[in-house]
Image (cartoon, rainbow, N blue to C red):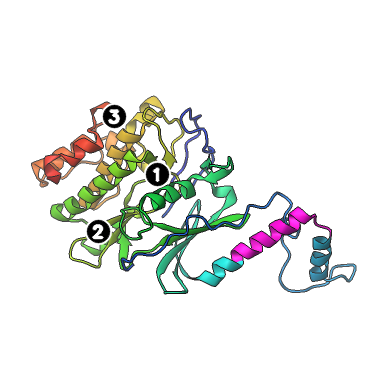
């Protein structure tokens, strides 16, 4: 579960300080639709006017059917409202014509994710539904319109991947639809794959040090690449790390950029977005945090949970209720100690982690 804490943020003013609850393929090249959008309707679209109307036709107290009532309301709509309604219906129809939605994969405070596939070639996809009132982080696009940061970041990543799906560690955005009251993101769905928590459970509740090393090396490289692109994920954890299991060597994929943001070199954040259990100590002590040290802290949390049969809690770690296994190698313990240093300035940078002896 993830929440933004109730403090004012000087470096993250585009994000609303509302509670955000979080949960949580065959490799082939496929063209990415850079933008597939039905223009957002204004506050008086037909869907708002007839909110709560059931599909079943029933008579009201004057004997007029609700279906007829809806038609009457639509007759009185302005041209702009009719166009907005048509645009939303067209976007929904286009989505349904291109994709089949199947069982639910997960649900959190920002929306729900479903398995599905693209009709034309049965390419596996994940379909993410995000209610507009749960889009907590926004940024202005090239036209000055406010856009979901998750969409903006994934469009940036897709553009820099040059249209290839399955190449980068972050899963690819294939298309997205703005349906007025919700966004639909159609994402690459690696198959077969499970999140790191399930992968750990399927492998005896803890991973061997060698397996954890393979995963952490890929993860550190991936978040370093994000940092170089000025992207701060903010919620790297087991549930947001997919492990592709189709080969002998597990492959890391990163999902869920719903709380992410674009970051400047010296950005300082005073609103916490992420998993409360994993809040870095500096937020408790100084009521602020930065991108690099926080991401390194999260590397320590991920590794700790991979190697121990328990969940990590910053509060329990600070009160010494959690300890690092003594049977781990000296280099591994050193890696964990460095990532989980209480003072952010004492943690290594991501580049230094890449050069750490344990990952060499």
Name the spot of residue 140 as percent of width and height, x first.
54, 40
- Asked if residue 88 lies left or right of residue 107, the reply is right
The disc placed on residue 275 is 1
Q: Secondary structure at mark 2?
A: strand
Disc 3 from disc 1: Cα separation: 18 Å
In the orientation shown, which residue stands out farthest toward the right? 62
Name the spot of residue 113 as percent of width and height, x first.
46, 61
**Structural crowding at the residue carrying mark 2, measured as other residues with C-alpha within 10 Å and reported as few (<14), some (14–19) or many (≥20):** some
**Structural crowding at the residue carrying mark 1, measured as other residues with C-alpha within 10 Å and reported as few (<14), some (14–19) or many (≥20):** many
Q: Which residue is mark 3?
A: 344
Residue 334, by quadrant, is top left
Is residue 78 found inside the magenta-colored segment of the image? yes
Foreground mark, 1 or 2? Answer: 2
- Between 288 and 245, which is closer to the camera in this rendering? 245
Residue 21 in view here: no
The magenta segment is 76-92
For marks 3 and 1, the one nearer the N-term is 1
Q: Secondary structure at mark 1?
A: loop
Q: Which residue is mark 2?
A: 251
Above or below, comparing residue 109 to residue 98 in the picture: above
- Between 179 and 205, which is closer to the camera in this rendering? 179
Foreground mark, 3 or 1? Answer: 3
Q: Main secondary structure of the magenta part?
A: helix
For marks 3 and 2, the one nearer the N-term is 2
Give me the residue at 18% from left, 65% from top: 248
Q: Secondary structure at mark 3?
A: helix
Which quadrant, please, contains the C terminus? top left
The disc placed on residue 187 is none
Residue 319, by quadrant, is top left
């Amino acid at each position: 579960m993830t929440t933004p804490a109730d403090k004012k943020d000087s470096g993250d003013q585009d994000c609303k300080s509302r509670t955000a609850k979080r949960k949580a393929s065959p490799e082939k090249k496929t063209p990415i639709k850079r933008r597939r959008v039905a223009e957002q309707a204004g506050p008086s679209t037909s869907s708002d006017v007839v909110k709560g109307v059931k599909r079943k036709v029933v008579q009201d107290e004057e004997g007029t059917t609700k279906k007829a009532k809806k038609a009457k309301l639509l007759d009185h709509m302005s041209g702009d409202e009719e166009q907005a309604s048509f645009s939303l219906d067209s976007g929904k129809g286009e989505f349904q014509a291109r994709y089949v939605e199947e069982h639910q994969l997960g649900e959190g405070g920002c929306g729900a994710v479903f398995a599905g596939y693209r009709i034309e070639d049965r390419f596996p996809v994940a379909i993410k539904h995000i209610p507009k009132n749960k889009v907590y982080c926004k940024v202005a696009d090239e036209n000055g319109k406010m856009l979901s940061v998750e969409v903006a970041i994934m469009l940036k990543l897709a553009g820099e991947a040059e249209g290839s799906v399955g190449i980068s560690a972050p899963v690819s955005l294939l298309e997205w639809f703005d349906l007025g009251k919700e966004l639909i993101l159609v994402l690459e769905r690696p198959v077969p794959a499970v999140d790191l928590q399930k992968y750990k459970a399927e492998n005896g509740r803890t991973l061997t040090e060698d397996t954890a090393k393979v995963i952490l090396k890929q993860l550190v490289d991936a978040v370093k690449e994000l940092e170089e692109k000025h992207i701060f994920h903010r919620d790297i954890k087991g549930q947001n790390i997919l492990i592709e299991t189709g080969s002998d060597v597990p492959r890391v994929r990163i999902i869920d950029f719903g709380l992410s943001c674009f970051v400047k070199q010296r950005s300082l954040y005073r609103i916490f977005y992420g998993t409360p259990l994993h809040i870095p100590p500096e937020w408790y002590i100084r009521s602020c945090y930065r991108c690099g040290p926080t991401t390194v802290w999260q590397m320590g949390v991920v590794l700790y949970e991979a190697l121990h049969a328990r969940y990590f809690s910053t509060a329990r770690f600070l009160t010494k209720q959690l300890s690092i296994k003594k049977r781990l190698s000296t280099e591994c313990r050193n890696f964990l100690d460095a990532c989980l240093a209480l003072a952010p300035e004492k943690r290594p940078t991501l580049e230094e982690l890449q050069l750490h002896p344990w990952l060499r």
